[in-house]
């Protein structure tokens, strides 16, 4: 699943919208969650890390994120 804000870059989302997105994802029971550091503020990234401590992955250029048993 890919979700975006639907807003222009100069109109950032609110912490309430971040919480709504977290709740949306929790209902879908994801196995991996990660936010782009390029497109996300530190507060949003930390909120997702806190909400998904077991499955959150930092997205870093040049590093693989492996999903499945072949880790």
Image: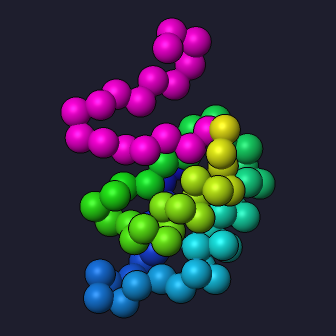
- In the displayed structure, 11 sits above or below 17; it is below
Q: Residue furthest left?
A: 62
The spot of residue 17 in percent (x, y) is 59, 79
Answer with the quarter of the image where residue 9 lies: bottom left
Drawn side of residue 6 relative to residue 19, left or right: left
Drawn side of residue 23 relative to residue 14, left or right: right
- In the image, the segment drawn in magenta is 55-71
Which secondary structure class fits the magenta region best? loop
Q: Residue furthest top?
A: 70
- In the displayed structure, 71 sits above or below 9; it is above
The spot of residue 28 in percent (x, y) is 72, 49
The spot of residue 55 in percent (x, y) is 62, 39
Drawn side of residue 9 relative to residue 50, left or right: left
Q: Is residue 5 visible?
A: yes
Q: Residue drawn 23% across and 41% down?
A: 61
Q: Residue drawn 73% across and 44% down?
A: 29
Answer with the quarter of the image where residue 32 lies: top right
Q: Nearer the viewer, residue 4 or 51?
A: 51
Q: Is residue 25 visible?
A: no
Q: Residue furthest bottom?
A: 11
Answer with the quarter of the image where residue 42 lies: bottom left
Q: Residue drawn 58% across and 12% down?
A: 69
Whether 20 is among the magenta residues is no
């Amino acid at each position: 699943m890919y979700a975006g804000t639907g807003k222009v870059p100069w109109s950032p989302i609110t912490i309430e919208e971040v919480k709504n997105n977290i709740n949306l994802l929790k209902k879908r029971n994801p196995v991996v969650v990660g936010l782009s550091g390029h497109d996300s503020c530190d507060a949003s990234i930390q909120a997702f890390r806190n909400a998904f401590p077991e499955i959150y992955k930092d997205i870093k250029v040049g590093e693989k994120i492996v999903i499945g048993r072949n880790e």
